[in-house]
Amino acid sequence: MKVLWLQSGGCGGCTQSMLCSEPRSLFDELRDAGIEFLWHPALSVDSGEEALTILEDCAEGRLAFDALCIEGAMLRGPNGTGKFHLMAGSGRPLTEWVARLARHAKWVFAIGSCTAYGGFSANTPGNPLEACGLQFDEQTPGGLLGAGFQSSAGLPVINIAGCPTHPGWVVDTLEKAVLEGLTVADLDEYGRPLLYAGELVHHGCARNEFYEFKASAMKQSDLGCLMENLGCKGTQAHADCNLRPWNGSGSCLRGGFACIACTEPGFESPGHAFQETPKLAGIPIGLPTDMPKAWFVALAALSKSATPKRVRNNAVEDHPVVMPAVRKKGGGK
Amino acid sequence: MSRIVVGPFNRVEGDLEVSLDLEAGRIQSAQVNSPLFRGFEQIMVGRAPLDALAIVPRICGICSVAQSAAAASALAGAMGVVPTVNGKISRNLICATENLADHLTHFYLFFMPDFARPAYADRRWYPAVAQRFTAVKGDAAAEVLPARAGFLRMMGFLAGRWPHTLAIQPGGSTRAITAGERIRLLALLREFRGFVEKRLFGDSLAAVAQLASKDQLLAWADGRAGDFPAFLNAATDLGLDKLGRAYDAFLSYGAYGLFPAGTWQAGQAAAFDPVAIDEDTTSAWLAAGQPRHPAQGETIVDANKPDAYTWCKAPRYAGQPFEVGALARQVIAGHPLALDLIQRDGASVMARVVARLLELALVLPAMEGWVNALQPGEPFCAHGDMPEDASGTGLVEAARGSLGHWLSIRRGRIERYQIIAPTTWNFSPRDASNRPGPLEQALVGMPAGEGAPPTVQHVVRSFDPCMVCTVH
Ligand code: SF4
Ligand code: SF4
């Protein structure tokens, strides 16, 4: 699989994240799966004329490639000119390059939430950058390529959303495409591969015991569940962050801070401060999507009344202060 | 006189285009253009102050932690919060991990592959260097990625994930390290030290840290196996120790309590005065006006401004362009090797690379000390209230130099947020007095165009530019 990779209105973090791919060296992993970069702005040696020739040949259909990977939002402004991002050396808007190249790609991958849905660039008040995703404008289908776009493999844009994306999400999706193919059934309604978006961040969170008892963190660095007070969206965010570690052993929740649902369109403007949970009459709004609110409230009241002391006390400290009891053998009491 | 445009300039972070005016194959003048604008400063306006912690890391995926740390200290200033002892150590560790990983990535993936260009095929060092450093396919790439990923596991423990963590808070860190994890961190540092000593240096960190002059450095490298010696060998052969000098005016905000803040100009060290900074928009597609201190700064788009040629502002210190980065940090910290290099030849491609790798030798042992100093069980985060009206400044050192955030809060919302990134200093355009930025100056006089060796590439990459930061 020949991959052409371009970057636009993003931070380059998805590439940096991808280079953390584990356990094997990214380059070895990709090579053995038959995946190679035809050009990548951060990794290839060709620059200037040589690079533009590759891109022009691909855009004209003279040079074959399989996958177009785009990282960063599409900047259509000011006034539709695309001048906020001209491809260096070419004087032409990156949006124009992307539209021309997408016509020849078997698969188009949006790498990261900026590319998928518009990202922070689209969240400046009034969106003066006229930023959008490849096939979405936040939650609304459309974007640069249009709602009806299909790559030559008959698929919409595949949105490997995340800010940044986890290296495994990218590598596994590319390998799935090249080894087994991808179909629409492999994607959810926002175009995300189910291989990672079929889970919720809440699954496997190390704070699940605190969640069960609604033993909540009160302040940053507390061990308790971050949903009730500190803005955690883990019960609503589609991603396997707590099942597939980041950087060997981490995740946002293991790092002690709330999931801000960076894989969801529009996460940049949640309508409240990121690290606070908006509440109505003391009850968090934005409860788990699959659970009727009344049940949640009833269960929460019940579980709070049954919270073990260990869980209650540890929830509001940054390290465990009450250890799990050790049951003595024999003695019988 | 003829003009050529070099771009896309790859293996840098983000988008870069360089216009060169040539006379008889030599550069008469250079204009550096960042052809991308994102405008994060506007995104922040009207937000809850602590939202900056979630927004600013997204300015840059390569120094996202440095952005977090700058925001956290600006917010800490606004709140009057002082981080806990553990919190400070954690922040140092998190920032140092990112900075050192960045030096490593730059050397192996961005900088060295240029030596494998066919233009150098007849040099005696070429076969070995091409085998090791060819982009993506060279032996070194396959080796350095696992070393880098292994080292960034530090971030899994200390920050939850990298890039884009929310662990760094005004009062310290959300992630308290346990006694058991402290052992793991030490093991990760040892593992990384092993790679750096075996493959990069071919010697101990201590031996590299003690090199005190250019002569000692070259004598040390002579005949030694290791990637740094291989670089020194090729760089001397190509004269990169005399190439890429800008103004020899350096600035640092100081890092980790290990390297002090200061300036260095015309052979003189001086104290750093944060009031002396301002930003000029003469050559940027931004509304013109008098240069302003960033605490009063504005970023208003004027996309059709005549004579403008970039989205980058021109930061100046006491009205002068200054160079920032590892070399600046080490010169200001008075490291004898860095001082000797610039006193003999001025800032050069070689001096900049040497200073970055020197920081690996100096900072890794310090990190081991910091991990030992962590006190599991003691607080990692101090807490405080956000006032309705306040202002704050966050000055940190990212891998590639001085990064500043200036914010003000009114009625509980962010009223103004201005950022000056390291590459904004180094790749700044001309100011109102038509003075070129450091890179623009460094390119003057060099051969370029048809048939010229790829020296422009070396000079540009010696600054380790990060264009997404520049234009935030
Ligand atoms: S912190 Fe978030 S992800 Fe973890 S248990 Fe609580 S709600 Fe779920
Ligand atoms: S835990 Fe949430 S915010 Fe963190 S990476 Fe996963 S989806 Fe994004």
Image (cartoon, rainbow, N blue to C red):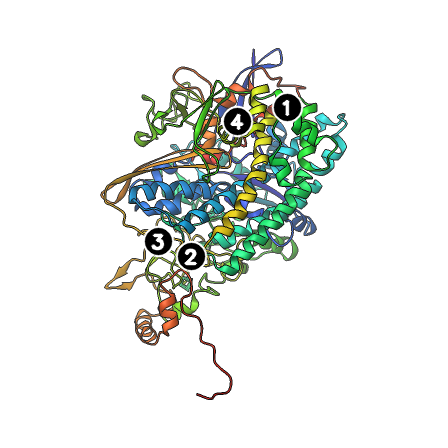
Question: Where residue A248 sits: x, y (%)?
Answer: 56, 55
Single out the mark in the foreground, 3 or 2.
Answer: 2
Check chain identity for marks 1 and 3: say if they share one. no
Tell whether circle 2 marks a residue whose Cβ is less than 8 angstroms from ligand 1: no
User: Dot 2 corresponds to which residue?
Assistant: A256
SS for callout 3: loop
Which is closer to the viewer, label 4 or label 2? Answer: 2
Task: Let me know if marks 1 and 4 both belong to one chain.
Answer: yes
Q: Do the residues labelled 1 and 2 touch (CB within 8 Å)?
A: no
Q: Which amino acid does label 4 sit on?
A: Glu
Q: Distance between the residues labelled 1 and 4?
A: 22 Å
- Label 4 close to label 3 by CB (< 8 Å): no
Chain letter, disc 3 residue: A
**Marker disc for residue B17:** 4
Sequence-earlier tag: 1 or 4: 4
The CA distance from mark 4 to mark 3 is 39 Å
Q: What residue type is labelled 1?
A: Leu
Q: Are marks 1 and 4 in contact (CB under 8 Å)?
A: no
Between marks 3 and 2, how big is the CA–CA gap?
A: 11 Å
- Please state which of the two labelled residues, at mark 1 or mark 4, is closer to the viewer: 1
Q: Depth check: A290 or A147 in front?
A: A290
Residue that carries the numbered disc 3 in the rendered image? A275
On the question of residue A111 being in view, the answer is no
In the displayed structure, A86 sits above or below A155; it is: above
Q: Which residue has dot 1 on it? A: B240
Q: Distance between the residues labelled 1 and 3?
A: 49 Å
Crowding near the residue tagged with mark 1, few <14, some 14–19, many ≥20 C-alpha atoms within 10 Å: some
Protein chain holding label 1: B
Answer whether residue A177 is visible to the viewer in this image: yes
Local SS, label 1: helix
| Quadrant of the rendering where the N terminus of chain B is positioned | top right
**Is the CB atom of the residue marked by disc 3 within 8 angstroms of ligand 2's nearest atom?**
no
